[in-house]
Image (tube, rainbow, N blue to C red):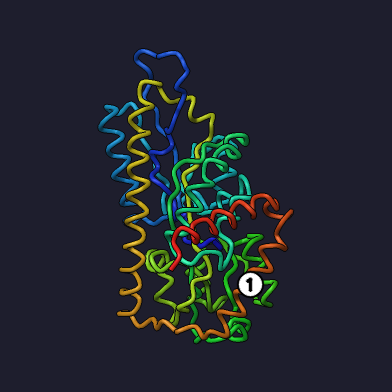
């Protein structure tokens, strides 16, 4: 997603996925020492993401008799997502539950799944992402990371203090830009938007101080991070569909006793699917919360949708060779078209 945010690492999958397939061929170790994996996330304590992850972690601890435990550093305790990946490479963390922005720190080509205005429904996104996920898992494996089951952030919208009904309105905003994200940066450049680079942990204070007066994110992320209390409007037009995933260093996998590998794999798969259902419902609930608190959803005019769509489709081609390959873009478009052919209205 646009990183959709943003929200956030938030988006991450069941952390127990960390153990998926770990060291299945290693010799069995009797009386092995307990293993604790250190996992970072931007998701705040008590958020829908952490509720699912905490339950999965408790189940892992119980069913492995505490031989395997997870230590979460939630709510940005370890910095922003680029910090997570750097710390994993330094051995200071074992893994992280991140959005596609964090995933891009490992292999940027995965952002081809978050191109603006690419998908018409969550089901369409699911079809494409599920089809391409094994391909990206192999790419991550080659770079020393296990890319586990897919998590979710959801549809990404513009949130602002002033009403946005046309692209010109967006150009008048001081709009948050997540660090040096190349995908969102390309969108901003194409549309002539005024991006203010900040990390996710800085956005709330920046909205309060007036350093920025607009941002973007999913409804559940906006509520969990309290951004919604600093804005008055949200566009009805979603820009992109944002995802997340749990990544674990392959070195960390070697810590896993082989006898404990199958159970966490099963827990991971079940909780990744559960997480996506929870986040989709939470996004709908968050829209209601925002509305009750005075955030107005502005119906995006067709002219603005058309202008944004035209610029987005041009960006798809312009990022070929910079963020992803021509072949990877074709894979996404072919899978999307395949879905649409099977689900003609």
The residue carrying mark 1 is 195
Residue 25 drawn above or below residue 297: above
Q: Quadrant of the C terminus?
A: bottom left
Whether residue 180 is visible = no
Residue 259 drawn above or below residue 230: above
Q: Quadrant of the N terminus?
A: bottom right
Q: Residue 122: image x %, image y %?
A: 43, 61
Q: In the rendered view, does 326 fall on the left or right side of 47?
A: right
Q: In the rendered view, does 22 fall on the left or right side of 260?
A: right
Image point 62% across, 71% down: which residue?
196
Residue 293 drawn above or below residue 82: below
Question: Image quadrant of residue 260?
Answer: top left
Question: Image quadrant of residue 48?
Answer: bottom left
Asked which secondary structure carries label 1, the reply is strand
Q: Residue 6: image x %, image y %?
A: 50, 61
Image point 25% across, 32% down: which residue?
62
């Amino acid at each position: 997603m646009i990183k959709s945010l943003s929200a956030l690492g938030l988006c991450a999958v069941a952390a127990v996925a960390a153990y998926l397939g770990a060291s299945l061929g290693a010799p069995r170790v009797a009386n092995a020492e307990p293993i604790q994996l250190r996992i970072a996330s931007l998701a705040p304590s008590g958020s829908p993401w952490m509720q699912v992850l905490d339950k999965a972690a408790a189940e892992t601890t119980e069913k492995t008799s505490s031989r395997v435990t997870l230590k979460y550093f939630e709510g940005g305790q370890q910095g922003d997502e680029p910090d997570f990946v750097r710390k994993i490479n330094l051995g200071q963390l074992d893994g992280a539950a991140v959005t596609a922005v964090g995933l891009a720190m490992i292999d940027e080509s995965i952002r081809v799944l978050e191109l603006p205005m690419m998908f018409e429904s969550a089901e369409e996104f699911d079809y494409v992402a599920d089809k391409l996920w094994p391909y990206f898992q192999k790419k991550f494996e080659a770079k020393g990371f296990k890319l586990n089951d897919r998590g979710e952030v959801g549809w990404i919208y513009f949130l602002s203090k002033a009403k946005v009904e046309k692209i010109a309105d967006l150009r008048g905003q001081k709009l948050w830009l997540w660090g040096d994200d190349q995908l969102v940066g390309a969108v901003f450049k194409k549309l002539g938007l005024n991006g203010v680079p900040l990390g996710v942990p800085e956005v709330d204070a920046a909205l309060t101080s007036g350093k920025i007066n607009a941002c973007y994110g999913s409804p559940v992320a906006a509520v969990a991070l309290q951004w919604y209390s600093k804005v008055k409007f949200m566009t009805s037009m979603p820009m992109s569909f944002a995802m997340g995933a749990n990544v674990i260093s392959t070195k960390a996998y070697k810590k896993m006793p082989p006898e404990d590998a199958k159970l966490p794999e099963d827990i991971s798969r079940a909780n990744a699917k559960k997480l996506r259902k929870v986040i989709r419902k939470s996004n709908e609930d968050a829209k209601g919360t925002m509305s009750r608190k005075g955030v107005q959803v502005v119906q995006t005019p067709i002219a603005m949708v058309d202008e944004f769509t035209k610029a987005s489709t041009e960006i798809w081609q312009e990022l070929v060779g910079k963020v992803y390959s021509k072949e990877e873009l074709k894979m996404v478009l072919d899978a999307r078209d395949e879905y649409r052919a099977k689900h003609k209205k």
